[in-house]
Image (tube, rainbow, N blue to C red):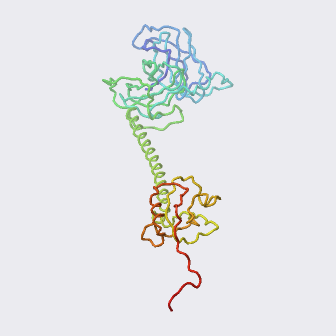
C-alpha cells in the first residue's frame, strides 16, 4: 500500500463514503492526453453509496505537481494531462470533500499512439513553491516516527493531505498561520509508499517507504507544527533515488546540525584569535627591535654635544695694569659706561683713575683701600673723606679738598747710593 502527502486548500477531512474506478486495459500505464471514463459506486461499508456530485479527481505526481480536475456529475471523464514518464497516485473526492479512496497502484504515464498533441500537458511547475523532507528519496519511515516536512513559498495558510494507496480515507491537516513545518507522526501501515507534494499542486518529493510495527495507535504522539524548518531536508527532485536506512528524528538531526554549527563557530573564533595574536606579536617584536637599536643612556651622555661657547670680543684697546685702585658703588644702572663716547671726566671718574677696567676684561686682584696697604695713598684727610661716602653714593665723585701728596720722582743725578 502506498500513500501520498499533498498540500491542498480545497479538501476537507475525508470519509470513505463511495468508491470509484476507471476502465483500463491490461496495461497499468496511462496514456498522455487520453480521456478515461470513471464510475462511481457505493463504499464497501455502505450499499447506499452516499456521495455528493460533482466529483474531482486528484492526481499526485511523484516529484512533480498535483492536479485537481473536475470530472463531472454523471458521465465522469478524466483526461491525463501529465507528461510521459511521470508517476501518478490517483484519488477521488466529491463536492463535500468526502473521499472515494485512493488507487491501489502508482500509475506511470506513457506516450499516446498516433499523433495526439502534447499541448494538453500542464505547464512547468513553480519551483519557488516546494516541500522538502528530512528523509531522502525512497528512504524508510518507521511507524510512529516523526516525518519533518518543510514548506517553502506559496501563500499561507497551508493544507496538508495524507493519502495512502488503496486507503479508504485521506487525512487533511491545516497548518496554523505563521507555521511552515509539519512534524507528521507516521501512522500508516508498513510497506507503504509515501509521496508529498506542495500546495497549489507544486513540486513534491520522491517516494518514502514505511516500515516497522503494524500498531499505528502511537499513544501520546501527535502531529505538530512549527515555523522552524526541519534539518537535513532533501530536495523534491525525482532524480534522487538513494535509499536511506536512517530513522533519525528531525529533533536529533537538528541537534547534530547545532553541534556542527557550534564547531564551525568555535573554529572561526579561534582563527580570528590566532590572527589577532599574530598581529600583536609582530608589533611587539617590532617595538622590541626598535628599542634595541636605540642608544643607551650612557651612550647618549657620551655622545652629547656640548653647547657652543659664547665669547664677547675684546675692545680695540688695552687697559694698562693699575698701580693704585679703590672700589666705588654705582647706584644708577642707566648711567653711561666706559663704552660710551663721553669723556671720562664728564662721567665723573676720579682723576686718579686715568683708565678704568673694561667689563669684558678680566680684572686681576687689586689692593683695597685699607690703611696698611702701602699701595694706597696715606693722606689721612683724603682717606677719612673717602670712608665717609655711604654705600650706593653715585657719581660725580667729589674730589677731596686737598690733592693727595705723591712722592716726587728723583731728579737725575740726585740719587746717592753706595757701591
Looking at the picture, does residue 130 appear above or below residue 157?
A: below
Q: Residue 4 in the image: state x and y as whole percent.
A: 47, 24
Q: Is residue 121 left or right of residue 17?
A: right
Would residue 44 appear left or right of 401 to someone viewing this image? left
> How many numbered tags mark residues here?
0
Looking at the image, the residue that sits furthest to the left is: 219
For the point 46% across and 69% down, the residue is 378
Q: Nearer the viewer, residue 419 or 306?
A: 419
Q: Quadrant of the N terminus?
A: top left
Where is residue 326 drawn, in percent x and y? Answer: 49, 65
Along the line of sight, the residue nearer the viewer: 293 or 312: 312
On the question of residue 268 being in view, the answer is: yes
| Residue 370 quadrant | bottom left
Q: Is residue 418 above or below residue 328?
A: below
When the figure is inspected, residue 308 is found, relative to residue 75, above or below; the finding is: below
Q: Residue at x 52, y 19 (%)?
A: 58
Q: 195 or 271, which lies in front?
A: 271
- Provide residue 287's location: percent of width, then percent of height: 48, 56
Q: Is residue 27 visible?
A: no
Residue nearest the viewer, comparing 23 with 212: 212
Q: Quadrant of residue 336?
A: bottom right
Residue 254 in the image, given as x and y percentages of width and height: 40, 34
Asked if 100 appears above or below 315 in the picture, the reply is above
Q: Quadrant of residue 414?
A: bottom right
Amino acid at each position: 500500500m502506498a500513500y501520498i502527502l499533498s498540500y491542498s486548500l480545497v479538501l476537507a477531512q475525508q470519509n470513505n463514503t463511495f468508491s470509484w474506478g476507471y476502465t483500463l486495459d491490461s496495461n497499468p500505464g496511462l496514456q498522455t492526453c487520453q480521456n478515461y471514463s470513471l464510475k462511481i459506486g457505493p463504499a464497501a461499508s455502505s450499499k447506499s453509496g452516499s456521495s455528493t456530485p460533482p466529483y474531482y479527481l486528484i492526481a499526485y505526481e511523484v516529484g512533480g505537481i498535483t492536479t485537481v480536475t473536475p470530472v463531472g456529475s454523471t458521465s465522469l471523464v478524466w483526461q491525463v494531462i501529465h507528461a510521459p514518464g511521470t508517476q501518478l497516485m490517483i484519488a477521488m473526492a466529491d463536492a463535500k470533500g468526502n473521499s472515494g479512496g485512493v488507487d491501489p497502484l502508482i500509475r506511470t504515464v506513457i506516450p499516446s499512439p498516433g499523433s495526439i498533441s502534447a499541448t494538453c500537458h500542464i505547464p512547468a511547475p513553480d519551483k519557488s513553491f516546494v516541500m522538502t523532507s528530512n528523509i531522502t528519496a525512497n528512504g524508510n519511515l518507521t511507524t510512529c516516527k516523526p516525518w519533518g516536512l518543510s514548506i517553502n513559498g506559496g501563500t499561507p495558510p497551508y493544507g496538508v493531505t495524507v493519502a495512502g494507496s488503496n486507503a479508504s480515507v485521506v487525512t487533511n491537516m491545516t497548518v496554523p498561520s505563521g507555521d511552515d513545518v509539519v512534524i507528521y507522526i507516521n501512522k500508516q501501515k508498513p510497506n507503504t509508499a509515501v509521496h508529498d507534494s506542495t500546495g497549489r499542486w507544486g513540486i513534491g518529493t520522491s517516494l518514502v517507504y514505511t516500515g516497522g510495527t503494524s500498531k499505528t495507535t502511537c499513544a501520546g504522539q501527535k502531529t505538530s507544527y512549527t515555523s522552524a524548518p526541519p534539518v537535513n531536508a532533501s530536495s523534491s527532485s525525482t532524480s534522487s533515488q538513494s535509499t536511506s536506512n536512517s530513522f533519525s528524528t528531525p529533533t536529533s538531526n537538528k541537534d547534530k546540525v547545532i553541534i556542527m554549527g557550534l564547531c564551525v563557530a568555535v573554529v572561526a573564533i579561534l582563527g580570528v584569535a590566532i590572527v589577532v595574536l599574530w598581529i600583536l606579536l609582530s608589533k611587539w617584536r617590532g617595538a622590541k627591535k626598535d628599542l634595541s637599536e636605540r642608544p643607551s643612556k650612557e651612550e647618549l651622555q657620551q655622545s652629547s654635544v656640548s653647547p657652543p661657547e659664547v665669547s664677547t670680543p675684546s675692545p680695540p684697546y688695552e687697559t694698562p695694569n693699575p698701580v693704585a685702585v679703590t672700589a666705588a658703588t654705582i647706584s644708577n644702572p642707566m648711567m653711561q659706561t666706559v663704552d660710551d663716547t663721553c669723556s671720562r671726566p664728564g662721567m665723573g671718574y676720579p682723576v686718579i683713575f686715568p683708565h678704568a677696567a673694561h667689563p669684558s676684561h678680566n680684572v686681576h686682584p687689586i689692593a683695597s683701600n685699607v690703611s696698611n696697604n702701602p699701595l694706597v695713598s696715606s693722606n689721612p684727610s683724603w682717606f677719612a673723606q673717602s670712608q665717609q661716602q655711604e654705600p650706593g653714593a653715585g657719581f660725580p665723585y667729589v674730589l677731596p679738598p686737598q690733592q693727595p701728596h705723591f712722592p716726587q720722582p728723583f731728579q737725575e743725578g740726585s740719587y746717592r747710593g753706595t757701591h
